Amino acid sequence: MTYVGEPGSARCARPARALSAGAVLAVPVLVWPLVCVPAAQAAHGAPVPAAAPAERRVRDIQGAGHLSPLKGAAVARVPGVVTALTGNGFWMQDPAPDRSDATSEGIFVFTRTRPSVAPGDAVRVDGRVSEFRAGGTRSAALSRTEIDATRTVLEARGVPLPPPVTLGPGGRRAPGAVIDGDDRGGPGRDAETGGRFDPVRDALDFYESLEGMRVRVTDAVAAGPSRDGEIPVLPAGGAGAGVRTARGGVLERASDANPERVLLDDALAPLPAMNVGDRLPGAADGVLDYGFGAFRLLPTATPRRQDGGLARESTRPAGAGELAVATADLGGLSPDAPSERFAALAADLVEGLRSPDLVAITGLRDNSGADDDGTVAADQTVAEVITAISAAGGPGYDWRSVPPRDNADGGEPGANDHVGFLFRTDRGLGFVDRPAGGAVGPPADGSAAPGSPDPATTPVRAVRDGSRGVRLSLSPGRIAPGDAAWSRTGKPVAGELTWQGTRIFVVAAKWYPRTGDDQPLFGRYQPPLRPTEWRREAQARVVAGFVRSVRALDRDANVIVAGDLNEQEFGGPVRTLAEGAGLRDLPASLPEKERYTAVSGGNARALDHVLLSPALARREHEFDIVHRNAEFADRAGDHDPAVVRIDMTGGRRGAGTGGGAGGGAESGGGSGERAG
């Protein structure tokens, strides 16, 4: 505030001593500093110093919205109590809140270097209001409102911290299903600048109204395993949460992404390793921050973990007349992985899946792992897997795949992930080798003989096989490897096998992954765009077309599609495949609480699938997702394997559309479905 008047005049009388022109009066009882300018100076056009910025409260800076109404403005003497520190700033909160839940009372103060204040210090801050957006202005992340501090004045020490806001029952409850309910005319619209700010209806706005404040969760239960310093939890033991899984998690559904989940982050204090169902008894207090596309509770002290007793599952072994077909994602396994990981994966196959006849394998790297040295063969990786299976007491297995071209299938450069088949050699299952220039078995590098077609680029086709109906032109062979749907991503592999004389066609697939290309659930754009789903939709159409071509030549062909499809059972791509090819998606037939093979951010999802053609779906079959990885902090991979056991003896047949609890898992139960 600038006064025009002589220093020492009545208007500029405090303090009583005379001051020179332009002096700043540091008067504690005043709201703003005073700048006194002689009248003569002002009358002759001399520049008058700019008014000092007005005092604001934190709630004025935060405003009832995602962007500060004071963005870019200078603010002075903003009061607050320091609640937490980081290496380049601190959080503070107004100890005298108003009655509105729409405006946050906390804020991050950016100091560039480690601040000298401590929690419990009462301070006043000068600076400029900014919106920090990680990733730059075009990022899909929300911004974090900050004060870019120019001065911090300490007023007192040892001040009690403002009480935390309890999240969940007994406190402020996040909206149960709606992240953002505004209709902005389509997906990908900017939630920061459009729509209505409604913390009661929209979870996006609910958490924004608490940004920078002290919050608390009590008796939290882990909805996902700890990973990378994060633990997704449900407050109050999960009371009032969405559909819970059979083992203590929470299921993501088409209409509910479970915004009541709270993500704990170890930015300020170490967090314990936790499995799904583990608890944090008592209270976990911290500040609510935003980063990496999600709101995060940063505890200021390490909470105590209570073991929930979660056990790894095992399914039952297949009977003499049952064909057991499984899917397992190895999570980027290469020969240089620790021996303990090979042992854990072997335990999944031998103890968990009970040594199935055939396993559709994804996520297996070439012999040099991530070394970008031109290697594409994976025979050494496979040999270590087979050796580990034998060491775990399992049977002998063989392997088929089509080595990719170097760095043509996306993923980590040099890794050259393989899609293929592990199959037993002792139960009547045989692989029909119909190569294209050395695509199978030896030579180990997958190279073609001179003048032979390249197996990595030669498409497999369904061809008529006289009176026997249909066969594959290649086995194994890649499905439409030149189609744009597979650009820079892994290609599905089809194989022809026989089970005790019955011909079976199996497709192993790993569809385009969910990556940072997708906009975050709690991001700036709502509803978020998911461009990776568009890729998977195109891939689903290609695979469905291939299956149709097989069934067009033999309506009763035995076809199985299995693998990591990176899409849920209710997602468009899985429906496109199932409906477009006349297949039955087995995860969708399970009881809802059993439908998950992965847990991401605390949301349980069915990303790995097995689909059957009508000829197999009519047979008695039992499907089981065997939970051994997704819920555990210590795990061999991110995904749970799954297996279907099909009665191939020609026994009971039926519509094949019914489902129910199968009771097909041991050692703690499991998800099972029997139909026929």
Image (tube, rainbow, N blue to C red):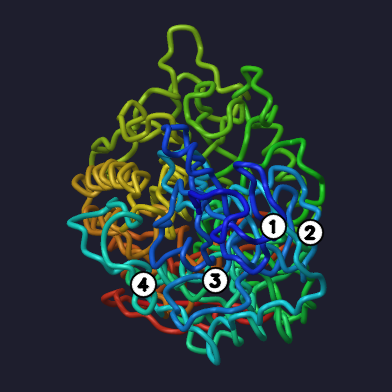
Label 4 and label 2: CA atoms lie apart by 35 Å
Disc 3 crowd rating (10 Å Cα; few below 14, some 14-19, many 20+) is many
The quadrant in which the C terminus is found is bottom left
- Disc 2 marks which amino acid? Val
Of 390 and 513, nearer the camera is 513
**Residue position marked by numbered label 1 in the rendering:** 90
- Disc 1 marks which amino acid? Phe
**Residue position marked by numbered label 3 in the rendering:** 105
Label 2 and label 3: CA atoms lie apart by 19 Å
For the residue labelled by badge 4, is the local secondary structure a helix, a strand or a loop? loop
- Find residue 419 and report its horizontal and vertical position in percent: 51, 40
Residue 108 seen in this snapshot: yes
**Residue position marked by numbered label 2 in the rendering:** 117
Mark 1 or 3, nearer chain start: 1
| Camera-nearest label, 4 or 3 | 3
Give the residue drawn at x 56%, y 76%.
249
**Residue position marked by numbered label 4 in the rendering:** 202
Give the residue drawn at x 65%, y 54%.
25
Whether tag 1 and tag 2 are in contact, CB under 8 A, the answer is yes
Give the residue drawn at x 38%, y 76%.
177
Of 647 and 415, nearer the camera is 415
| Camera-nearest label, 4 or 1 | 1
Of 521 and 289, nearer the camera is 289
Whether tag 4 and tag 2 are in contact, CB under 8 A, the answer is no
